[in-house]
Amino acid sequence: MKNQGKNASPLFKGMSQSREATLFYGESVDLFAQIVKKNFVPGTYTLADLGGNKGEFLSKVTEKLPEYSFKSYVVDVNLGIEIGLNAEKIDGNILENKFEDKSIDIVFLRYALSWNPFDKQKDVLKEVSRICKGVTIIQHQGYNDVQISEQDKVFSKIFDGRIPEIARNDYFPTNLSQVEKWMSELGLRFSRVQNRKVENISNLFIEKYRLNEKDAQLIKDILSGCDYLMQTCWVLDFRN
């Protein structure tokens, strides 16, 4: 089970307090809804949210699209599904889904790549290309292309156990150039629609994990001088 944090579900619904959480989570609902509207006329479509936790984000995006009808799926290792969400939950890893080739019109992959080991992230992109027949929206949190080693060294410290609430060994952030290199090698047609540096990312961790005052100060001290992540969004088009 992934350690998403005590306050993860509200954040995934866009219910954020800090500026950083709003940028990373709150604004994503409108962004994804706008991309769907731009690429699909109102109608009935299949939609799969890969790594979508309990479907909190999917629920909010579909609320923004009342003129559309979806046969929805949520794939995640975390058990359970958002109350009231009309979707089928598939408990398991993204790479172990049950979808047939080219069976899904719209795929969401939001902040899911970094939960997979580096040697599996390209496989995730390949799996997306296998199942999607329409459009995939990928939103990613990763390192700056020019400061990879420094960020990796610093961020590894916040997950190594010194802050128990955040401790984990399954976080593998990659940088923009690496992800786009994989997509190019796979022959995927993509466009980058967002790429920005989100400063003071420690505030997001503080809110998401409800850190006490001591741990909140500790994470700020650890990330001092490197307190940011890059937020990037791509649209992959699999239509002929």
Image: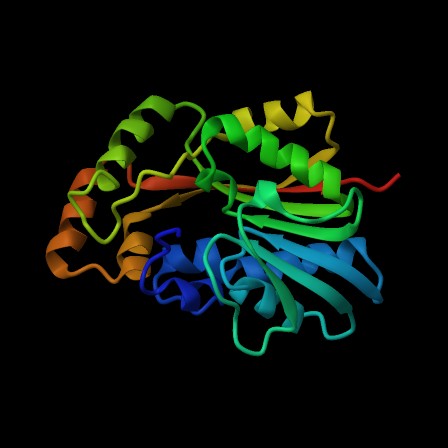
Q: Quadrant of the C terminus?
A: top right
**Residue 126: x and y, percent?**
66, 32
| Image point (74%, 65%), residue name | 71
The mark total stands at 0
Q: Nearer the viewer, residue 227 or 14?
A: 14
Is 212 displayed left or right of 63 in the figure? left
State which quadrant residue 90 falls in.
Answer: bottom right
Report if residue 224 is visible in the image. no
Q: Residue furthest right?
A: 240
**Residue 120: x and y, percent?**
53, 30
Report if residue 64 is visible in the image. yes
State which quadrant residue 52 falls in.
Answer: bottom right
| Image point (75%, 66%), residue name | 70
| Image point (76%, 59%), residue name | 46
Q: Nearer the viewer, residue 45 or 151?
A: 45
Is 93 displayed left or right of 126 in the figure? left
Placement of 107 over or under 149, stated as above or below: below
**Residue 42: x and y, percent?**
83, 66
Placement of 104 over or under 30, stated as above or below: above
Is 199 displayed left or right of 125 in the figure? left
**Residue 199: x and y, percent?**
35, 45
Placement of 111 over or under 240, stated as above or below: below
